Image (cartoon, rainbow, N blue to C red):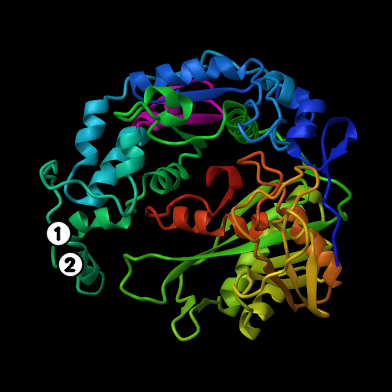
């Protein structure tokens, strides 16, 4: 079967398939009076903030699409000129940052990044940014809606789990305890607790972005991390004169960062058109921490998304959710019930009544105990449906004649409750396939509850189009699954002491 491309709704009720078309022609779906201006902050080194200021000026004006390549006579259809932030989003874009921290010491950042212990290095580097962000937010009478965190390239290169520092450049820090010893202390604590205090450094992940997001949750500070090389690629070149990294054209970068900025400031760029009323989608999130001594121990969360794209993350209980025999995550009855109760309670708060339909999306199957908990947590008025969404087997391929692969929206039905769905493929609006090889489908299977398969497939296809952290025609995975790993990574990247319910924008 073939599913029509889901349409998006923009201002004046206008409907189009491509977000950039709708924003260019009509503007965002939300009421422009609710967000007349974007109030953002910027934090970085003097050079980083200087580069941001230069880039911010370009966001206020027209940015054309790149010229055709040497093998083409026409502009590629996916490229749409950026008309200027105010023209695209109907909100003023301050060229000069309303809130500014422009004096982070680059030498201090470099020294800290090179601490020998990687957990100490990344934690202390994040400290430099977090301490200033929190202090500035507390000082301001009116804090910004979100902060641009401009990072030097060294933070990207050395602030990741697999990064290493050459032994001749390593700096000796204060942490002497090993990670292995830190794990032992979880089950064999010392008498006075000195080692335990030093071992706390291993509760912080060696990933700068994830740890920064995690530590700012309790402060309710929203961030947009951007590399200096993204803002000013021409400033960073190799010895042969070539840029150190290939980035997208300026108009595409403006669309992506502009959409993210509008969303994180509180705006709604677009929403799905022609949706059924009272529908709620939940994506389950599970993540294990490498720091725990119990391999079964994991955190769980639920991502709730409404048809207008609004998202909330609910953090559930920690527990032995990972099954070592099946390699899958499953909650017990009580934890499943508590998680869905939070979701239904928030939906009821927003709409005055429980959802008419609640779809739970997960990568794994549902156990009887887990599903009975979900059912107990949902209202009797709600039709509860459990859907498994996973990558299909690598040997599943579908070919068609012509220059392009299978059309996006094609589905191969396996049974009444199971189909392979091609969420990536040839897109008529783009007149191309945005991928390197023959696209693979995803497997969509209704495991619990009742709903027509075509309805579930249409919903999944639509949910690939409400990623507000970018401005793409579509993602390959629905938003309920697409960000599951990213949200889970944030949840385990620092000790959690924030409230269990926060808007989705805090995590991306």
Q: Which mark is residue 356?
A: none
- Residue depicted at x 36% and y 44%: 208
Residue 165 magenta: no
- Residue depicted at x 70% and y 35%: 76
Q: Are marks 2 and 1 in contact (CB under 8 Å)?
A: yes
The vertical placement of 157 against 198, above or below, is: above
The residue that disc 1 covers is 177
Q: Which mark is residue 181?
A: 2
Q: Residues within 10 Å of mark 1 (few under 14, many from 20)?
A: some
Residue 297 spot, x, y in % from top left? 41, 73
User: Distance of mark 2 from mark 1, alpha carbons?
Assistant: 7 Å
Q: Which of 32 and 154 is in front in this view?
A: 154
Going by the image, does 217 lie left or right of 24? left
**Residue 82 in sight from this viewpoint:** yes
Residue 398 spot, x, y in % from top left? 72, 69
* Quarter of the image where the C terminus is located: top right
Going by the image, does 40 lie left or right of 312? left
- Residue depicted at x 25% and y 74%: 187
The vertical placement of 92 against 22, above or below, is: above
Which region shows up in magenta?
Answer: 131-152
Q: Nearer the viewer, residue 358 or 338?
A: 358
Disc 1, SS? loop
Q: Residues within 10 Å of mark 2 (few under 14, many from 20)?
A: few
Residue 289 spot, x, y in % from top left? 38, 65
The vertical placement of 190 against 78, above or below, is: below
């Amino acid at each position: 079967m073939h599913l029509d491309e889901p349409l998006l709704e923009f201002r004046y009720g206008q409907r189009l398939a491509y977000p950039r078309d709708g924003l260019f022609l009509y503007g965002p779906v939300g009421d422009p009076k609710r967000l007349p201006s974007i109030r953002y902050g910027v934090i970085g080194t003097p050079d980083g903030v200087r580069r941001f200021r230069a880039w911010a000026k370009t966001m206020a004006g027209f940015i054309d699409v790149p010229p055709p390549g040497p093998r083409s006579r026409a502009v590629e259809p996916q490229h749409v000129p950026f008309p200027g932030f105010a023209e695209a989003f109907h909100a003023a874009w301050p060229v000069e940052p309303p809130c500014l921290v422009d004096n982070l010491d680059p030498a201090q950042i470099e020294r800290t990044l090179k601490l020998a212990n990687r957990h100490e290095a990344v934690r202390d580097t994040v400290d430099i940014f977090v301490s200033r962000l929190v202090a500035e937010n507390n000082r301001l009478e009116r804090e910004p809606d979100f902060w641009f965190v401009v990072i030097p390239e060294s933070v990207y290169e050395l602030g990741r789990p697999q990064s290493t520092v050459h032994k001749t450049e390593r700096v000796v820090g204060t942490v002497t305890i090993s990670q292995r010893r830190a794990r032992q202390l979880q089950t064999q604590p010392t008498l006075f607790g000195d080692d335990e205090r030093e071992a706390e450094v291993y509760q912080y992940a060696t990933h700068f972005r994830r740890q920064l997001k995690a530590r700012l949750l309790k402060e309710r500070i929203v961030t947009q991390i951007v590399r200096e090389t993204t803002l000013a690629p021409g400033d960073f070149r190799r010895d042969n004169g070539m840029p150190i990294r290939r980035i997208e054209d300026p108009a595409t970068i403006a669309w992506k960062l502009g959409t993210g900025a509008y969303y994180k400031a509180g705006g709604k760029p677009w929403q799905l058109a022609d949706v059924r009323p009272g529908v709620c989608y939940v994506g389950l999130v599970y993540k294990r921490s490498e720091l725990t001594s119990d391999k079964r121990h994991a955190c769980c969360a639920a991502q709730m998304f409404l048809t207008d794209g609004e998202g909330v993350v609910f953090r559930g209980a920690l527990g032995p959710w990972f099954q070592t025999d099946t390699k899958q995550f499953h909650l017990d009855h009580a934890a499943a019930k508590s998680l869905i109760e939070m979701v239904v309670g928030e939906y009821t708060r927003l709409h005055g009544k429980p959802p008419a339909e609640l779809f739970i999306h997960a990568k794994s199957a549902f156990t009887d105990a887990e599903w009975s908990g979900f059912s107990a947590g949902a209202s009797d008025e709600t039709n509860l449906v459990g859907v498994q969404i996973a990558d299909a087997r690598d040997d599943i391929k579908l070919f068609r004649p012509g220059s392009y692969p299978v059309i996006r929206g094609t589905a191969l039905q396996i049974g009444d409750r199971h189909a392979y769905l091609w969420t990536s493929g040839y897109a008529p609006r783009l007149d191309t396939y945005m991928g390197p090889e023959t696209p693979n489908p995803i497997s969509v299977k209704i495991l619990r509850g009742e709903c027509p398969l075509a309805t579930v497939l249409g919903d999944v296809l639509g949910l690939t189009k409400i990623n507000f952290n970018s401005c793409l025609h579509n993602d390959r995975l629905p938003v309920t699954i697409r960000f599951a790993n990213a949200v889970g990574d944030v949840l385990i990247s620092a000790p959690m002491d924030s409230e269990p319910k926060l808007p989705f924008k805090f995590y991306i």
